Image (cartoon, rainbow, N blue to C red):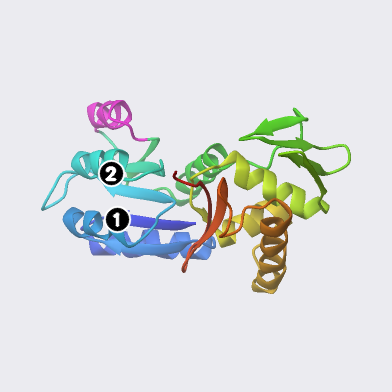
Amino acid sequence: MHIAILEDEKSLADELASLLMKNGHEVSIFGDGLHLVDTFSVELYDMFILDWNLPSIHGFEVLKHIRNVLGFKPSVIFLIPNDNEAGIIDALSSGADDYSVKPIRPKELMARINALLRRSYGAPKKNNFPETIFGYTFLNTDRTVEFFDTKVILTDKEFELAHYFFSNLDRPLLRRHIMMLIWRQSEEGLSHTLDVDIASIRKKLNIDEHSKHLKLVSIHGFGYRLTQVSH
């Protein structure tokens, strides 16, 4: 995941960044809330870890921008002093997904992050089939998809990949995260395999750049998003 850290205490920000990078995440550090908000138009983040008190704008104001400005809902964890029970209540009531106390407890923080990761993205569904999503019916028994009087057969991985995109319509999905969920690993060696399967489902499901219904678009430097075509 690409995680934005908003923390004006450099030593703590560096500690957090080191912990997250050791666990395979991409990290961007910000010491100022206004600077972070300014990047929303050019950067995509899967999760935010926000400090409580900041020199420019309060963490709650940044949270408000995240919820109101961004077109999807990334997870937000607030960093709150250990003895500030009122702050914890306020953070959760204002739309934060979780909190972590300061000084941080690394194992606990990673457990909270991983829990939010599972809750936000989840594993590709493997039950409740057949399932129809935006006119596409997924049939798990023979790994086929029916749409607009068309029926196509997918490989196992293509089926999981396509179903995952359809289950997260209009949500930016990180390449590394896709590989972790579909192939259970995020090694660079899988990058070509992902590209091949992406090209295949675009063609088979008619969700390429010429589609008039849904398009699976690339997000440079980030991943992909399945989006509805505006008419």
Residue occupying the point 49% across, 56% down: 1
Please tell me the numbered disc located at residue 69.
Answer: 2
Q: Residue furthest right?
A: 142
Identify residue type, mark 2: Val
Q: Inspect this view and state whether residue 91 appears.
A: yes
3D distance between C-alphas at marks 1 and 2: 8 Å
Disc number at residue 40? Answer: 1
Whether the residues at callouts 1 and 2 have beta carbons within 8 Å, the answer is yes
Left or right: residue 223 versus residue 123 is left
Quarter holding the C terminus is top left
Please state which amino acid type lies under the numbered disc 1.
Answer: Phe
Range shown magenta: 84-96
Q: Nearer the viewer, residue 136 or 22?
A: 136
Instruction: Give the image quarter of residue 6.
Output: bottom left
Residue 192 placement (x, y as % from top left)? 69, 72
> Residue 182 appears at what percent x and percent y?
70, 53
- Circle 2 residues within 10 Å: few <14, some 14–19, many ≥20: few
Q: Quadrant of residue 115?
A: top right
Viewer-side residue, 152 vs 34: 152
Image position, residue 148 (x, y; %): 71, 39
Residue at 52 percent of width and 40 percent of height: 120
Q: Secondary structure at mark 1?
A: helix
Up the image or down, 41 lies above or below 94; here it is below
Relative vertical location of residue 159 with respect to residue 16 in this rendering, above or below: above
Tell me residue 185's x, y (percent): 69, 60
Q: Is residue 142 magenta?
A: no
**Direction from residue 65 to residue 43 in the image, left or right:** right
Foreground residue, 110 or 73? Answer: 73
